Amino acid sequence: MGETLPGYATGAWYGLWTTAGTPSAIVEKISADARRAVESTDLAAYMLNKGFDAATSTPVEFAEFIKRDAAKTAQVIKSANVRLE
């Protein structure tokens, strides 16, 4: 991508979602459990072996990341004049 759009960099990322209105206590529990799993020695080693750079964030940090990523992608689509037909 960077060869076509100078300065542009991207990568794959994964995350967990739940339905809107899920109580914050449940969201925090899922987040804490996921973080604990990703940071566990066995899973961290497995992911690194498969080429993943495992990172965790809070639900608020992840929401902000998604907003920034969506804005960046929208800018690329607009500047490239991408159209759905």
Image (cartoon, rainbow, N blue to C red):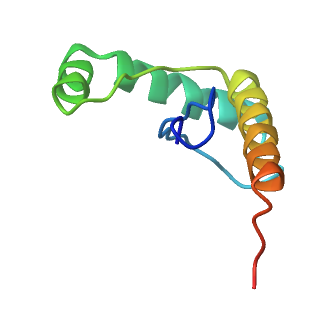
Q: Position of residue 53 (x, y in %)?
A: 36, 22
In this view, the residue farthest toward the bottom is 85
15 sits to left or right of 59: left
**How many dots with numbers?**
0
Task: Relative to 47, say whether 4 is above or below.
Answer: below
Task: Relative to 69, say whether 41 is above or below.
Answer: above
30 sits to left or right of 62: left
**Which residue is located at x 26 percent, y 20 percent?**
44
Is residue 57 or residue 21 the one in the foreground?
57
Quarter holding residue 42: top left
Is residue 29 or residue 19 the one in the foreground?
19
Quarter holding residue 45: top left
Is residue 81 or residue 43 the one in the foreground?
81
**Which residue is located at x 46 percent, y 29 percent?**
34
Task: Relative to 43, say whether 30 is above or below.
Answer: below
76 sits to left or right of 52: right
Q: Position of residue 19 (x, y in %)?
A: 72, 55
- Tell me the quadrant of the picture where the C terminus can be found: bottom right
**Which residue is located at x 68 percent, y 29 percent?**
62
Q: Position of residue 21 (x, y in %)?
A: 83, 50
Q: Position of residue 54 (x, y in %)?
A: 39, 23
Quarter holding residue 57: top right
64 sits to left or right of 58: right
**Which residue is located at x 69 percent, y 28 percent?**
59
